[in-house]
Image: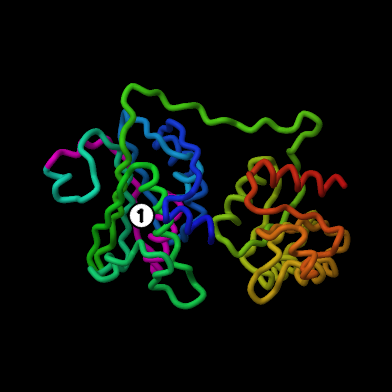
Amino acid sequence: MIRQLLAFSRRQLLEPRILDLNRTIMELEPLLRRLIDTNIELQISCGPDLHPVLADPGQLEQVVMNLVVNSRDAMPQGGKLLIETANVELDQEYVVRHIATTPGAHVLLAVTDTGVGMDAGIQARAFDPFFTTKASGQGTGLGLSTVYGIVKQSGGNVWIYSEPEQGATFKIYLPGVAGAAPEEPERPSPPATRDLRGTETVLVVEDDEMLRFMAGRALRTHGYAVLEAESGVRALEIVEEHEGAIDCLVTDVVMPTMGGLELALQAGDRKPGLKVLYMTGYTRGAVAEKALIPPDAWLLEKPFSPVDLVSKVREVLRA
């Protein structure tokens, strides 16, 4: 929550690089398809010869995912979701009509859905922190405010075009970088002393949807079979239903209804020999003080990189 508020207030530390937005979206496509429901049709239309943009790659991915999740939630009965990119030139007339924009070459990222849409009152508050139209417990209201903060800190602008029952389009304009070639993404080198790949089955339990999907993607990329649950209750159902072995439980420490420790104890009774890796935003000292995990438990502190997660899972499995 603190990181999201920092993003909204444009105080977050970004590490911008020259990027190809098309490439970013295409690499995200498999994850985006898993984020949406099966009754939503996803279409991606990437414009040709897109200008490079200067942005933090991780934060730009979060912008795309937050917009997709927002559109998904606006289409509970299904619909169509369209992601588009294009080179655009913002002229003086556009700048006069849209405060805080600058003229010149920009890259457009547009996310359009056929959902419930928004009236003028909701649009006016859409980027406010903690404002949400969802029922209690279904959202914090930080998704779009995080988008706003990241885009503004990256030198861009975001606008909403919507009518009730007519869907919505979010248009993001990022300044194009003239005469620059996109930088090749840095691929983390695996530790020289061990291979991070595996074929074991890992159950990931995390109530934060974004983190759960990203953790699952990282593990699958390295060969693991991954089961996912959004709560301890659902995780126990998966443990009961899954006929094969579950080699490692990766669970958040603090979750609604059932915490990580209770889940680990009950899952261990059903799957003897199950190894457990806890995740938390607290420090080890804090969770130990509250007896939230055993003193000798394996712990991975948030935030962590995909390589950090896979490396720790490999370490736990080999212990």
State the residue at coordinates (67%, 46%).
219
Q: Position of residue 179 (x, y in %)?
A: 33, 22
Residue 270, image quadrant: bottom right
* 164 to the left or right of 252: left
**Above or below — where is 132 with respect to 27?**
below
Q: Position of residue 67 (x, y in %)?
A: 40, 55
Q: Nearer the viewer, residue 244 or 235?
A: 235
Q: Does residue 117 appear in this view?
A: no
Q: Which residues are magenta?
A: 63-92
Q: Nearer the viewer, residue 207 or 280?
A: 280
Q: Position of residue 281 (x, y in %)?
A: 65, 58
* Element type where label 1 sits in the image: strand
Structural crowding at the residue carrying mark 1, measured as other residues with C-alpha within 10 Å and reported as few (<14), some (14–19) or many (≥20): many
Q: Position of residue 111 (x, y in %)?
A: 33, 51
Whether residue 80 is in magenta: the answer is: yes
Q: Nearer the viewer, residue 301 or 138?
A: 301
**Above or below — where is 104 with respect to 242?**
above
Q: Amino acid at mark 1?
A: Leu
> Which residue does the numbered mark 1 point to in the structure image?
81
Whether residue 91 is in magenta: the answer is: yes
* 30 to the left or right of 98: right
**Above or below — where is 73 with respect to 185?**
below
* 300 to the left or right of 152: right
* 15 to the left or right of 217: left
Q: Nearer the viewer, residue 228 or 98?
A: 98
Residue furthest to the front: 11
